[in-house]
Amino acid sequence: MNRQLILSKIINEEDKLLVAKMLDKIDFSNKRNSVEYTDFLDLRQSQLLEYILKQIRYTNYILFGGYKDAERTVIIIYPDKLEDILKNNKFDYNTIMGIIRIKLPNELEGIYAHRNYLSGIIKIGIRREKVGDILVKKDGADIIVLKENEDYIIKGLQELTRFSKSKFSKENIENILVEEPKIQKISIIIPSMRIDSILSELIKTSRSKALLIVKEERVFINHELVLKGAKEIKPNDIITVRGKGRFKVGDILNTTKKGNLVVEIEKFV
């Protein structure tokens, strides 16, 4: 593995640092014969690191975020001796991550949203990459965290006014509560099935701003990063826009007199 050659091909400094840290984890795993893992990664970051891993033909890794379809995951790197354990799902993931479960008092049920929990975590000095998905329910939330930060995060959140009456518990990762997302069906009228056309309608912005969001690497189709606004979208594709939400493309319902398409969309709310 030519470390310098790999890093020299990465222009973005933050990406270069991210890749360098992962390469360090591989070195540590090989030298110490140990399991190593990254911080939590968003969809773009995990795709970048997986691309690098495939380029160097490294296969001793898995992605894990606590549950199926988690948006934020860690890459777990393991030595050869643990291959069977990891690939046969016999590894104890509770050694890496856990759940902080927050139960709100009755008067706050249905009031707190994702931002209330995330801003609290940031306020106590925890970086976003140390926290996985935050699964919000009416009466509280399950927050996936790295095990080494669990106690610190609980102590910090308990000291915040917004959570002063809430109950906290530590749960094993397999006990995470995943609720079916609520879906709002809407219809949009678009000139074509290009991602920039669809995106401009979904988030109510201009085509030029939609294209800028694509170029900022914030748009994913079926968890794959999209880099071109001309990307054609098909029914049943899942569109994820960082900071804006997630959508499922439905059927083309009709065509207007001007030739525009009427498309059904399922918005996850």
Image (spheres, rainbow, N blue to C red):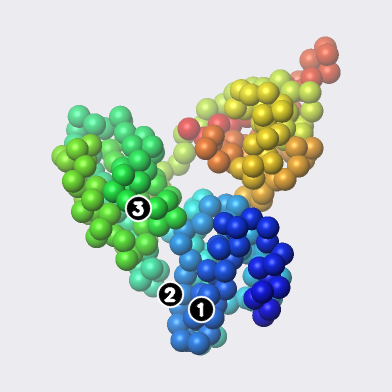
Q: Quadrant of residue 131?
A: bottom left
Q: Which amino acid does label 3 sit on?
A: Ile
Q: For the point 52% across and 37% down, which residue is it?
A: 243
Q: SS of the residue at dot 2?
A: loop
Q: What residue type is labelled 1?
A: Tyr
Q: Which amino acid does label 2 sit on?
A: Phe
Residue 262: image x %, image y %?
72, 22
In the picture, measured across the screen, residue 135 lies left or right of residue 140, that is: right
Q: Name the residue under label 1.
A: 78
Which marked residue is nearer to the observer: mark 3 or mark 1? 3
Q: Could you tell me if the residues under marks 3 and 1 are in contact, i.e. CB atoms within 8 Å?
A: no
Between 10 and 55, the one nearer to me in the picture: 10
Q: Earlier in the sequence, mark 3 or mark 1?
A: 1
Crowding near the residue tagged with mark 2, few <14, some 14–19, many ≥20 C-alpha atoms within 10 Å = few
Q: Distance between the residues labelled 2 and 1?
A: 11 Å
Which residue extends farthest top?
257
Q: How far apart are marks 3 and 2 (CA)?
A: 27 Å
Q: Quadrant of the N terminus?
A: bottom right
Q: Name the residue under label 2.
A: 91
Q: For the point 60% across and 62% down, which residue is it?
A: 16
Q: Which of marks 3 and 2 is nearer the N terminus?
A: 2
Q: Could you tell me if the residues under marks 2 and 1 are in contact, i.e. CB atoms within 8 Å?
A: yes
Residue 69: image x %, image y %?
52, 52
Q: Is residue 243 above or below residue 260?
A: below
Q: SS of the residue at dot 1?
A: loop
In the picture, measured across the screen, residue 177 lies left or right of residue 74, that is: left
